[in-house]
Each structure stands twice: as structure tokens, then as C-alpha cells.
Amino acid sequence: MNIVIWGCRGSITSPGPSTIRYGGESTCIEVRTGAGDVIIIDAGSGIRKLGRQLLKEQSVTKINLLLTHSHWDHLAGFPFFQPAYFSRYSFALCGGSDAQTSVLKYLMHQMDPPYFPVNFTELKARFESGCCCNNGLCEKSLQYADRSMRCESIPLNHPNGGVGFKFSDSSGSFVFLTDNEIRYSHPGGMPRDAYVGFCRNAGLLIHDAQFEESEYKKTRGWGHSTFQDALDLALDAGVQRLGLFHHDPDRTDDELDRLVDWCRNYVRQKGSSLECFACVEGMKLSV
């Protein structure tokens, strides 16, 4: 499977000269199966550019839209997602225990007056029931041509809840856990051991790493992990590659460079072969 990062900034979009290398767009991930199926995770500001790219691909008409949760930075780009305005597209919605109604409700509400000048009823695309993400497999409800692809979910440790995803096929597995606070128990969240098991032997894990340890003293309970928490999870789960994600909006490129160096030194000290990197807007990955 192939993965493209269209947005990896957390909390709020933060464009500017100090974030130009890693990017300032908020969360949006594209996953393509071996058969060419399109899966989009989250509709942060990065989805706008993804939409422009999809318009160029005449063969793409069915899209699986998965939402980890409905906080602003993960929804803000949807009103500017151009495929939603064209009748040739259909979307299977997924994300949460009652996703058939909740995901559509969140997308509609942000376009209600006075929040946005174009009403949701102006959209021409079809929005269909996807799956419920109650920690089961999605393969029968998502619009996959590639039946070898499996999608599993797990509750996130985050205020107001959320859902993390794992995609697996014959090439390996990709786990996406943004907005997941490993060291704090939020209602509906899981114990650390559950996340270790969910990530076990993944070829690629992209995980929230918004805070340094010094910052976490003030932000504990906000729903985000530290760099060390993400590293320790990946190490304990035997992950091959770790992408650090949900960069703090005030984190500059130079600061991220420094933190990536720190993370790689930490991995070396543990005697591990884990490949660690900070996610970059536009980055292409494969599993």
C-alpha cells in the first residue's frame, strides 16, 4: 500500500517561513491499496490539495473517508474539498461507533450558517454508510476493490474520544494513531498495553508526538503524547518505522530537526534498528 501525507500539523493550521519544510497543513492522510482504492483519513486543511489532485484522476469515483474524530483541525478542510461538489463521486463514511450518522452530522454542521457561506445541500457527491469502527474489520463495508486489505480500529485516548486505524495487506501493516495520549486515561480510551498490541510488528506507525517532556508538565490531559512516549510505544511493539506526527503549531522546522536528532539518539541508545522520522507534508511512504 502507498501512503501520502497531505497534512501533519496539529491543533491549527500554521503556514509560514518557520514551518515551510515540515508543512503547516492540518491532518490529512491518503492511503492507496494495491488495487488503487482511495482511503482518506481525516479532513484537515491538507485535504484541499488532495482534492485538487483527485480531480485529475478520472478513474477515481469511490472514496472511503475515515475520521479519527471531529475536532476542528481534523475537519477544517472539508468545505474546500472539491470532489464533494461533483456528482461523479461517492463517499463511504467511517469513524466511530455510530459513524453512519455522526460523521455526516459533523461534516454538515460545520457548513451550517453562519459558519460557511455554502450549505452542505449544495454538494453533489453521494455520502453513504461506511462502517461503525467498533474495533471490528471494515472490509465488508468500505468500498474496496482489493479484498485482501483489512482495516481495524481502536479507541484513542483523547478528550471527546476518537478512533485509530490499522490497515493490513500482504505487504504488511500501517497504523495511524494521531491525537493519542499514551500516558493519560481519557474516558473510552485504552490502556497502554492495548496500543502496544495493536501496533505489534507494524511496518509503519504514524503516531502523535506533539510535546517535549518539559512541555508535557503543563499539557498533561490535553490528549497528546510526548516524543519519548511515541518512541517507547514503537520500541515495545517492535515497529519497523515510526513517523512522528501532529506537530505543535508553534514548533519550528529547526526545532523539529533538533527533536528528530534527539529521537534517533534515543533509539540508538536502546540498541534498536527502529527507523524514526518526523512526518513532512507531501511525504510519500509505502508498506
Image: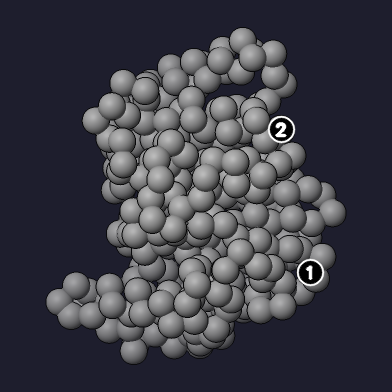
Q: Mark 2 belongs to which amino acid? A: Gly
Residue 1, position as x, y percentages in the image:
73, 53
Q: How is the image coloured?
A: one colour
The quadrant in which the C terminus is found is: top right
Q: What amino acid type should be assigned to the residue bearing mark 1?
A: Asp
Which mark, residue 238?
2
Residue 135 at x, y percent in the picture:
61, 64
User: Left or right: where does residue 156 sit relative to residue 220?
Assistant: right
Q: Is residue 85 visible?
A: no
Outermost residue, right side? 170
Neighbours of disc 2 within 10 Å: few (<14), some (14-19), many (20+): some
Spatial distance from mark 1 to mark 2, Cα to Cα?
A: 27 Å
Labels 1 and 2 touching (C-beta < 8 A): no
Per the image, the residue denoted by label 1 is 146
Q: Secondary structure at mark 2?
A: loop
Q: Is residue 265 above or below residue 253?
A: above
Residue at image position (84%, 54%) is 170
* 187 with respect to 270 (left or right): left
Q: Residue at (52%, 20%) from the top-left corner?
A: 263
Q: Which mark is residue 26?
A: none
Instruction: Judge left or right: residue 193 versus residue 18.
Output: right
Can residue 104 be seen from the camera position used here? Answer: yes
Q: Is residue 15 above or below residue 276?
A: below
**Which-is-in-front pick, marks 1 and 2?**
2
Residue shown at 49%/81% (left/top)? 100
